[in-house]
Image (cartoon, coloured by chain):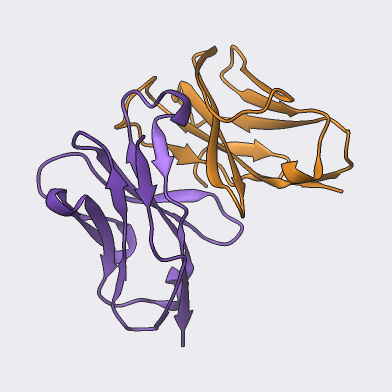
Chain colours: A purple, B orange
């Protein structure tokens, strides 16, 4: 079955430091890939998506992600973290025919804390 | 504001009761999705509607039901509530019916607490 793994449940970084959140997926074909962010008390907001083409995609709030087919990964990066980036981040795979899983399969999420 | 409106934002009720969660999708979106978010299960897909018809069904309990009305708003009905139903329920909408390239727009969620 298709799945998304986010190995890190919780990450703490210092403000101004760089960030990389890991995401691995299991899917037979080239997937549609997404990163969403959930701030406390808020819904999920799309950060960026990859459908095809350039494997390095830019998103909102200074985030970028790189699709690596050989590693089945889609890691999220930011060169300098701001305190306002503290939130929970979800990687997701989009499927054309997800069936009972729906079109969008989410990882368990990585909670980011930012130290001043 | 994402354009997806969910009501109520918070709901506290007792075991055995029934509640209805409401969702208005973003203007122009025909698909509505319901997700349940809990600490132990993460984000679980419940059900999807497209233009009034059920499109896909996920891990939705028999005690739960949903529908999408002609004006495209959707309701999720939860009955015979149990403590374990306490969770954040999200509604999302998208323009298309069934595509992995669907970009879902999420509402702020309805937090249900069952006492």
Which of the pair B20/A25 is nearer the observer?
A25
Residue at (10% x, 43% y) in the render = A53
How many marks do you count on the picture? 0
Q: Residue furthest bottom?
A: A116
Q: Residue furthest front?
A: A1
Counting from the top left corner in percent of width and height, residue A57 is at 19, 53
Would residue A55 be found to the left or right of residue B18 on screen? left
Which of the pair A44/A100 is nearer the observer?
A100
Above or below B108: residue A64: below
| Snapshot quadrant of residue B79 | top right
Counting from the top left corner in percent of width and height, residue A10 is at 47, 70
Counting from the top left corner in percent of width and height, residue A102 is at 44, 29
Counting from the top left corner in percent of width and height, residue B44 is at 54, 39
Residue at (62% x, 24% y) in the render = B74
Above or below A78: residue A98: above
Residue at (64% x, 38% y) in the render = B6
Which of the pair B54/A5 is nearer the observer?
A5
Q: Residue furthest left?
A: A54
Above or below A116: residue A114: above
Would residue B32 be found to the left or right of residue A3 on screen? right
Residue at (67% x, 28% y) in the render = B61
| Snapshot quadrant of residue A96 | top left
């Amino acid at each position: 079955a298709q799945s998304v793994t986010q190995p890190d449940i919780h990450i703490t970084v210092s403000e101004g430091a760089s960030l990389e959140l890991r995401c691995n997926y299991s899917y037979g074909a080239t997937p549609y890939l997404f990163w969403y962010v959930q701030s406390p008390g808020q819904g999920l907001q799309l950060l960026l998506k990859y459908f095809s083409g350039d494997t390095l995609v830019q998103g909102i709030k200074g985030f970028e992600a790189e699709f690596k087919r050989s590693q089945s990964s889609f890691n999220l990066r930011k060169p300098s973290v701001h305190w306002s980036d503290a939130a929970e981040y979800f990687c997701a795979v989009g499927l054309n025919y997800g069936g009972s899983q729906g079109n969008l399969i989410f990882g368990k999420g990585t909670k980011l804390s930012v130290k001043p | 504001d994402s354009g997806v409106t969910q009501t109520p934002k918070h709901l506290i009720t007792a075991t055995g009761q029934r509640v209805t969660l409401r969702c208005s999708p973003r203007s122009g979106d025909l698909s509505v999705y319901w997700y349940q978010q809990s600490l132990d299960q993460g984000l679980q897909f419940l059900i999807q509607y497209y233009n009034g018809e059920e499109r896909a069904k996920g891990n939705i309990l028999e005690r739960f039901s949903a529908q999408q009305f002609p004006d495209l708003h959707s309701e999720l009905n939860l009955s015979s509530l149990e403590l374990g139903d306490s969770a954040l329920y999200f509604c999302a909408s998208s323009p298309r019916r069934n595509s992995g390239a669907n970009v879902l727009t999420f509402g702020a969620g309805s937090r249900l607490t069952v006492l």
